[in-house]
């Protein structure tokens, strides 16, 4: 039996990564696409080879649909996650899940009340290259960890885009900063104790953040430096520096399914070991994890993880606003 997915929002990322992954999965399938415009839904469904289309409400009212993938602008995720949960659908929602910690708690609560699962689509976490990094750390190859540095930047700067629309939840932190922040939590396998963040804002665009620099202080003096920027040379990497070695994951977050990835690890001053992984479809791996958890084949507390991530994201927003170090313990 395949888990039947409906798509809420006929957008770019759904077509580029989610739908091909659904179409190639043995345990998930695309059942219906939904758009604000029926005309658009009809055209899109034809393009992606799906028989059924309609409005967002039609998707939620379709009894065959068991789960929805929400790929709307971030500012609309809460509304449609709550509507989907109340309609009894499991929710796989694009990153950043929502615009505040309070909103995250509300989404989790409504999903729990309606006995559906909620996952934030940070697909990079399912790419096996990170397991290799974690194995190296566990085998003490890197020694004691000192810093994590993660960059997510893109030349992208179309002023009418949802990514630069503050009212729709856009901005560098929400769109891009979530990746290195999530990666630092995964690699350190701990939560930061405090956060300091600075935004560069575009006042012509309503004060949306176009660059976010976030410093996260982890236990035992470990630090993560995470930068996200629009209008930047393309970077989607992270590096980990320890007492015995240093490594860099060159393509850490957005990884096309046909692409191999490389971890470069310093053996000494002049020698570097290259660890190659893939090609692999990280979106498909994420979807299949979601399906296996829903069918009780596996356990994964997605909701706990996304709440922890949301605390850190909120601490970054608050830190910029109040120009101070924000402690994670301030959030309950
Ligand atoms: N995980 C990843 O790798 C990844 C990569 C890129 C983006 N994302 C996330 O995915 C989401 C969508 O990104 P995208 O690049 O696919 O964007 P997009 O192409 O602009 O698609 C967003 C869709 O949302 C719907 N929508 C509803 N209200 C809207 C409004 N007021 N303005 C614009 N669109 C509206 C539209 O669908 P209809 O017209 O059909 O209703 C639109 O096609 C965002 O949350 C983004 O952060 C994730």
Image: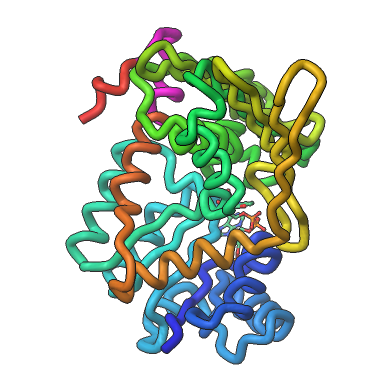
The residue depicted at 46 percent of the width and 58 percent of the height is 93
Report the number of discs.
0
256 up-or-down from 28: above or below = above
Answer left or right for 99 relative to 88.
right
* In the image, residue 173 lies in the stretch drawn in magenta: no
Answer left or right for 62 relative to 69.
left
* Quarter of the image where the C terminus is located: top left
Q: Picture coordinates of residue 84 (x, y %)?
A: 35, 68
Q: Magenta stretch: give its range.
A: 313-326
The residue depicted at 55 percent of the width and 25 percent of the height is 142
Is there any visible trace of residue 209 in the rendered image? Answer: yes
The residue depicted at 40 percent of the width and 61 percent of the height is 80
Q: Picture coordinates of residue 296 (x, y %)?
A: 28, 72
Magenta segment, principal secondary structure? Answer: helix
Q: Quadrant of ligand 1?
A: bottom right
Q: Which quarter of the picture shows residue 118?
A: bottom left
Q: Nearer the viewer, residue 8 or 205?
A: 8
242 up-or-down from 126: above or below = above
* In the image, residue 322 lies in the stretch drawn in magenta: yes
Q: Picture coordinates of residue 122 (x, y %)?
A: 52, 50
326 up-or-down from 150: above or below = above
Is there any visible trace of residue 320 in the rendered image? Answer: no
Q: Nearer the viewer, residue 331 or 248?
A: 248
Q: Picture coordinates of residue 117 (x, y %)?
A: 31, 63
Answer left or right for 155 relative to 113.
right
Answer left or right for 106 relative to 14.
left
* Quarter of the image where the N terminus is located: bottom left
Which colour assignment does the render follow? rainbow
The residue depicted at 63 percent of the width and 45 percent of the height is 253
């Amino acid at each position: 039996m395949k888990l039947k997915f409906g798509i809420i929002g006929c957008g770019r990322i759904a077509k580029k990564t989610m739908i091909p992954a659904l179409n190639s999965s043995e345990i998930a399938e695309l059942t219906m696409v939904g758009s604000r415009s029926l005309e658009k839904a009809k055209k899109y469904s034809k393009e992606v080879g799906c028989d059924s289309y309609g409005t967002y409400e039609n998707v939620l009212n379709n009894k065959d649909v068991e789960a929805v993938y929400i790929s709307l602008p971030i500012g609309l995720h809460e509304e449609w996650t709550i509507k989907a949960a109340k309609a009894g659908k499991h929710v796989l929602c694009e990153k950043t899940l929502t615009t505040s910690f309070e909103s995250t708690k509300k989404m989790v609560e409504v999903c729990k009340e309606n006995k559906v699962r909620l996952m934030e689509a940070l697909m990079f976490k399912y790419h096996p290259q990170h397991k290799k990094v974690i194995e190296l750390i566990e085998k003490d190859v890197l020694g004691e960890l000192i810093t994590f540095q993660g960059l997510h930047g893109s030349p992208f700067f179309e002023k009418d885009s949802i990514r630069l629309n503050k009212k729709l939840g856009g901005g560098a932190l929400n769109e891009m900063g979530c990746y290195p922040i999530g990666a630092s939590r995964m690699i350190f396998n701990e939560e930061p104790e405090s956060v300091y963040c600075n935004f560069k804002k575009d006042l012509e665009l309503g004060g949306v953040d176009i660059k976010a620099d976030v410093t996260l202080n982890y236990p035992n003096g470990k630090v993560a430096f995470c930068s996200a920027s629009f209008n930047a040379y393309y970077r989607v990497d992270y590096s980990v520096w320890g007492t015995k070695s240093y490594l860099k994951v060159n393509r850490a977050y957005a990884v096309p399914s046909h692409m191999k990835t490389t971890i470069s690890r310093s053996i000494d001053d002049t020698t570097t070991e290259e660890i190659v992984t893939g090609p692999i479809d990280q979106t498909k791996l994420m979807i299949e994890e979601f399906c296996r958890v829903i069918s009780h084949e596996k356990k994964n507390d997605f909701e706990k993880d996304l709440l922890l991530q949301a605390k850190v994201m909120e601490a970054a927003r608050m830190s910029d606003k109040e120009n101070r170090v924000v402690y994670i313990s301030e959030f309950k």
